[in-house]
Image (spheres, rainbow, N blue to C red):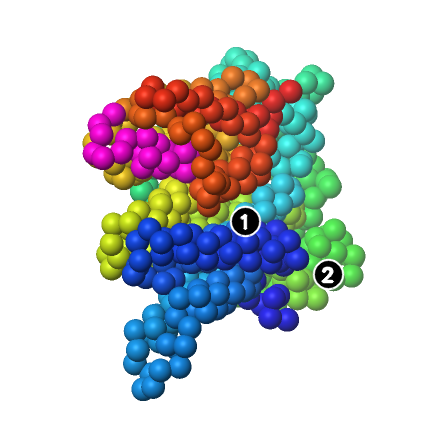
Amino acid sequence: MMGERFTIGRFGKPNFIDYLLALALAAAAVVIRAMLEKIAPGIAYFIALFPAVVLAGIFLGTLPAAVAAIAGGSAISGLFLGSSLLDWPPTSAAQINVLMFVLACAALLWATHALRRTVRDVKSAEARLAEVFRQLPGAAAILAAPHGRLLMRSAQSEAVLGQMERRLATSDELASYGGIHADGRAYEADDYPIVRALKTGEIVNGERIKYRRPSGKIVDLEVHAGPVRGPDGRIVASVGMAFDISDQMDAERRLRESETLHRSMSGRLRAAVDAGGLGLWEVDLRTDLISVDAKFAAMLGMPAVPTQMPRAEFRNYVDAADRQRVSSVFSGAAATGNTYADEVRMRTTKGDARWFVSRGAVLVDLEKVVGVVSDITERRVREDALQAALQARDVLMHEADHRIKNSLQMVVSMLRLQRAKVGDDAGQMLDQAIARVDAVANAHLALQRSPDLRDIEIDAMLEDLASRVGLLNTLVEMRCDLDARIWLDADNALPLGLLVSEVLTNALRHAFPSGMPGHVRLAATANPTTLEVLIADDGIGLPSTPAIPGLGTNLVAALAKQIGATLVTKTSPGNGTQVTIRVALPNAG
């Protein structure tokens, strides 16, 4: 129960391997602390353990991180504090160190727990939103700014548009679809409402277009579209939804034909016949009685027989929120002789809410109003679902930005606070830990800027990362040569950012000793199958005798294995080091 409540792991509840890895991190921290004791005795006892707790909390889970903190803290206390913990009164430096360590670990565990829980909640909400959007009735789609790349598409798109589902790279490809102008011209890509919403911010409600399916059949579509704006007000995407309203258009055409016949023929009987297939109603303005045919009566849950009742009684079927408006629109049409048209929400005899579109004509000579109704409940439900999906996406983006930014900033701030209290040697260790957490924050910032919260623009992320890591050694000039518009999915982009951060940090800290100036080059290129990242320096090169692998080396190996990357290192004493990272792109092949 404790594990289920407090461990919010990226891969579910922690397993035995996670605990072993957490203990390994703690053991590494103890070894590093022992080595530091020989090099610089007197530094903070638990300083090497904090990065281990942070890494375990982020990558393994809260409980493994707590186990690492307890095991490592106990080992360091036994090795370096010993019997001084039993001093009385309890005010010795050793006891104060232990107390501060416990408080700091508690804060770190809480921060990493909150971060992991936030990431899980965001991903879960995003998955639910995508599934809801996929199941929307009608042809629904989301295009990403600025080029109109297709992000999501509902399952009904193929049925409505007759187009095989495919992933659009840009909105220009919509020119191959079947929109038809009134003069017979084919739609250009920029003519479609979803593209207009993306490029100009136009909101389109109920635009009707002719559309030729690949089979050659021409249908009528009702299209809705609107822009999706980010927190800064810029358009980040557009959402569109199209419904096949061919049957409704046929019904409206029949109704217009019936209105023409009303003017040339005797009215009630001919209007009812010409409007066949729809529900019929008639209001006698002299007696204020309303008559409905069997079909309209059945729509309202009454017995399927022609029914007559006072109009005041019939108003009880109209939803209370619409009664005053419906009465006003009807009275205006009856008084002026104009055509009556309205959309109204009504309640059936069972209390269910249904939406109807009602159209009628005033027969002045007979002092009657006759008309037809059709049930449009499904269309209104689709429109409401579209609006709900847009609002849910806005809420999700704002919530993700707020929670992730606050959680990561809290971790970095706490590490920097500790950094201000230690010397240069220990400070370097903390700088490395801060760089690692800052790399995670940088990667998540890139994810938040992503138009679809799935893919990350690698070139922008690496450039931002280089500017942050470059502050570790201001004597070294950092140069970036990055191909533009390189995209990678978040599952691979986040570990890649950490991996590049580790290699850059090692270059800045070890390739230029004793204030030596130099240059570091970060380059990234991509082809259809592979992303290649190069980190090259002109420093002193790697030593001929390999050093004992430390936390950074092990972390680099683990991150490379996680994303299936290959690392090639070339070095020459006095001529610098070059590290090449190659990652296979997920869509390759």
Which quadrant would the C terminus be assigned to in this image? top right
Give the image location of residue 293, x and y in percent: 72, 52
Viewer-proximal residue, 29 or 108? 29
- Lower position in the chain sequence, tag 1 or tag 2: 1
Residue 51 seen from this side: no
Q: Where is residue 504 in the image (x, y as percent from the top left)?
A: 37, 33
- Label 1 to label 2: alpha-carbon separation: 44 Å
Q: Is mark 1 on a helix, strand or loop?
A: helix
Classify 41 as above or below 467: below
Q: Nearer the viewer, mark 1 or mark 2?
A: 1
Residue named by callout 1: 123
Bounds of the magenta span? 500-518
Q: Which quarter of the image is occupied by the N terminus? A: bottom right
Extreme-bottom residue of the structure: 89
- Which corner quadrant of the image does residue 513 belong to? top left
Residue at horizontal 44 percent and vertical 47 percent from the top: 397
Classify residue 300 as left or right of residue 142. Answer: right
Residue kind at label 2, given as amino acid type: Gly
From the image, tell me which residue sits under label 2. 301
